[in-house]
Amino acid sequence: MSGAPAVSFRAVDVVFGKRPNPALALLDQGLDRTAIQERTGHIVGVAGATLDVREGEICVLMGLSGSGKSTLLRCVNGLNSPTRGRMLVTVAGRTIDVASCDRRALNHLRTHAIAMVFQQFALLPWRTVAENVGFGLELQGVPRAQRDAVVAEKLAMVGLEAWKNAYAHELSGGMQQRVGLARAFALDAPILLMDEPFSALDPLIRCKLQDELLELQQRLRKTIIFVSHDLDEAMKLGNRIAIMDNARIVQTGTPEDIALNPVNAYVADFVAHMNPINVLRGASIMTPVDALRTLNGVVMVEAETRTAVRLDGQGGPASATMDGRDAVPIVDYRGPAQVDGLARRTVVSAPPHITMREALEIRRRTGAPIIVKADGRLIGAIGNAELYRGILGRPADRVSDDGRQDAV
């Protein structure tokens, strides 16, 4: 994922109304959107939004209904016009300010650089699935033979090639959303906007489409801005998340950043209902090696199972014992497919980015703590205490009498 921004919001304000200047002046004075609406009759949709979305990442805009997330998303392709600020889109090294560009440049962005997937599918009912997928290419003037080839490729990608001659009303909701995805991907636009695309679907279909989107993103590496009001969805999909409240972005960060360090009560309320096992990673939940009891190069990684690891001269794990005496193997973790083959009483050495879900599966299988290793060195350990703390969302911040960090 490149560090270069593909989309940049620069102090973007969106005010709905014919004479926005008085509302902007009140916004500059620090009044909230309710007070501004009462005084001016104008609605503040977005206030002071500044955010960079990097090439190839999924950035999720989330918040409660009415927080401004969809309004901000629609600024990217000009469906909403910023009242003030800059809305920069960079494609192939060329940067265009959507807030001030001419109609020709905006049309080019909409037809070649930016595609959108809507919540309600927005399929044309009189067109077949194939015709819906190829609609954007048709507007671009792409020849029929070339268009048909692209449509066939994208329908195969979303598993709907057998439905190409069907109409929207003949498809399930999940299938209709797949058509919307195929239509967006058919344009081969580098930037994809998704406005709560899965929220109208039942939970099982929603989860499946989330998985499919992540799989497609692994291959296509689009820049995706995804609007959601569901924190678990945001945590699952987003490389980064921007949380909005009352038209403002109140916190931006990785899923772990937001889960572990909410900036205010609003964000904390979201996090309180999150499922942490899909979000937290080993480096966040482990007890660091410096907080573990160490004697003569032997680290007590878990008092409960009396598991100890002897370090080599470089600080890496050389051997392990359980129950204070029995030698047990140390196995390097290679991924989830390995878990079912792990033997009881095996100490697994995992990288810092191992997920909490994987750590739970390993613990269930082996009955032993997981040691965390980076650059060949032991940097921490994950046992039952760390897993319980992670589930409860209680970070470790002090060292207890047995040498472990405990939550206060």
Image: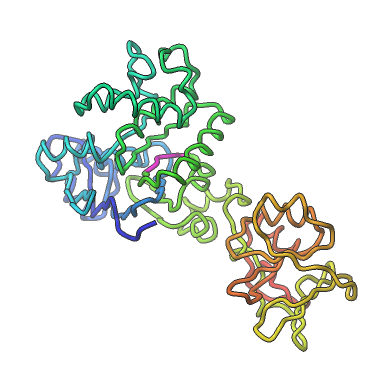
384 horizontally vs 274: left or right: right
Which residue is found at the position 50% from the left and 40% from the top? Answer: 230
Closer-to-camera residue (3/97) = 3
On the image, the x and y values in percent for residue 337 come to 68, 49
393 horizontally vs 193: left or right: right
On the image, the x and y values in percent for residue 142 come to 22, 27
Question: Seen from this angle, which residue lies furthest front?
Answer: 145
On the image, the x and y values in percent for residue 38 come to 25, 39
Closer-to-camera residue (145/25) = 145
Q: How is the image coloured?
A: rainbow
Question: What is the span of residues highlighted in magenta in the rendered image?
Answer: 225-229
Q: Quadrant of residue 224?
A: top left
**Which quadrant of the rendered structure holds the N terminus?**
bottom left
Residue 291 within the segment the image draws in magenta:
no
Which residue is found at the position 41% from the left and 25% from the top? Answer: 179
Q: Main secondary structure of the magenta part?
A: strand
Q: Quadrant of residue 106?
A: top left
Q: Quadrant of residue 120?
A: top left
Q: Is residue 156 above or below residue 29?
A: above
Q: Is residue 100 above or below residue 168?
A: below
159 horizontally vs 9: left or right: right
Which residue is found at the position 9% from the left and 40% from the top? Answer: 102
Closer-to-camera residue (40/349) = 349
300 horizontally vs 129: left or right: right
> How many numbered marks have been drawn onto this rendered protein structure?
0
**Which quadrant of the rendered structure holds the C terminus?**
bottom right
Q: Is residue 72 above or below residue 140?
A: below
Residue 226 within the segment the image draws in magenta:
yes
Which residue is found at the position 63% from the left and 74% from the top? Answer: 379
